Amino acid sequence: MASWCYGASRKLRPLLAALLLSAAALMRPAAAADEMLTVRMDQARIVRLPEHIATIVVGNPLIADVSLQQGGLMVITGKGYGTTNLVTLDRNGAVLSDQLIQVRGPGDGVVVVYRGGINGSVLRESYSCTPVCERRITLGDSPDFFGPTVQQTVTRNDAVNRTAGSP
């Protein structure tokens, strides 16, 4: 117990201790009450929703996206680096949960290459090396690397969709 409590009478000590514990519980951040949801960039995580949920709000949909599934499940997909929050409400607008979502960078097997560019700029390229290194679309890569990589992916996906649609 704190030293300032020693001067208090024996009758007040339990009351002071209870007040200190109550104050400590109230000072806890709201997000700490619920677990932090961590998702990797471009990956998904399945989370069970609270009962009686009517509304879901994502603070920044550029960081994380959610989709509802049957059976009270929600899929959270990491869209961009950073932290945002996820709030669930009931039909009366009461908050059922308020959780933080943290989206982290890609996991193992990603190699980031930094190159010196013109006028002292730094160019960044990302590769997925599992087991052979191939270009990877990653936020933060240099436009001269990111743009062609995205275009190749779009062109490939279009070709696959055309082929799949033909008899």
Image: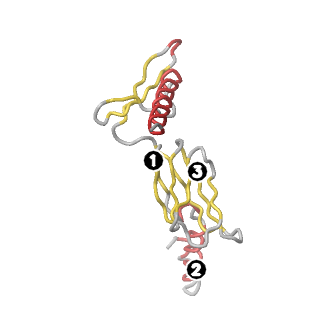
Q: Position of residue 131 (x, y in %)?
A: 28, 35
- At x 45%, y 47%, the residue is 43
Residue at which label 3 appears: 84
Q: Is residue 108 above or below residue 18?
A: above
Depth check: give the residue in front, 72 or 12.
72
Within-10-Å neighbours for mark 1: few <14, some 14–19, many 20+:
some
Q: Which quadrant would residue 112 be assigned to in this image?
A: top left
Residue name at image x 61 percent, y 47 percent: 61
Q: In the rendered view of the protein, which quadrant contains the C terminus?
A: top left
Mark 2 is surrounded, within 10 Å at the Cα level, by few (under 14), some (14 to 19) or many (20 or more) other residues, namely few
Secondary structure of residue under mark 1: loop
Q: Residue at x 57, y 87 (%)?
A: 11
Q: Determine which residue is flagged by label 1.
A: 43
- The residue type indicated by label 1 comes to Gln
Determine the secondary structure under disc 3. strand
User: In the current view of this chain or complex, which residue is farthest to the right?
Assistant: 92
> Does the residue at mark 2 contact the one at mark 1 (Cβ under 8 Å)?
no
As drawn, 16 above or below 72:
below
Which residue is farthest left? 131
Q: Nearer the viewer, residue 99 or 53?
A: 53
- Comparing marks 1 and 3, which lies closer to the viewer? 1
Sequence-wise first label, 1 or 3: 1
* Mark closest to the chain's N terminus, 2 or 1: 2
Residue 29 percent across, percent down from the top left:
58, 61
Residue 66: x and y in percent read 56, 54
Instruction: Identify which residue is drawn at 50% across, 68% down.
Output: 71
Q: Depth check: give the residue in front, 120 or 138.
A: 138
Label 3 Cα neighbours within 10 Å, binned few <14 / some 14-19 / many ≥20: some
Instruction: Estimate the spatial distance between the alpha carbons at disc 1 and disc 3, rounded to whole Å.
Output: 16 Å
Q: Amino acid at mark 3?
A: Thr
Disc marking residue 8 = 2
Please give left or right for residue 158 compared with residue 8 in the image.
left
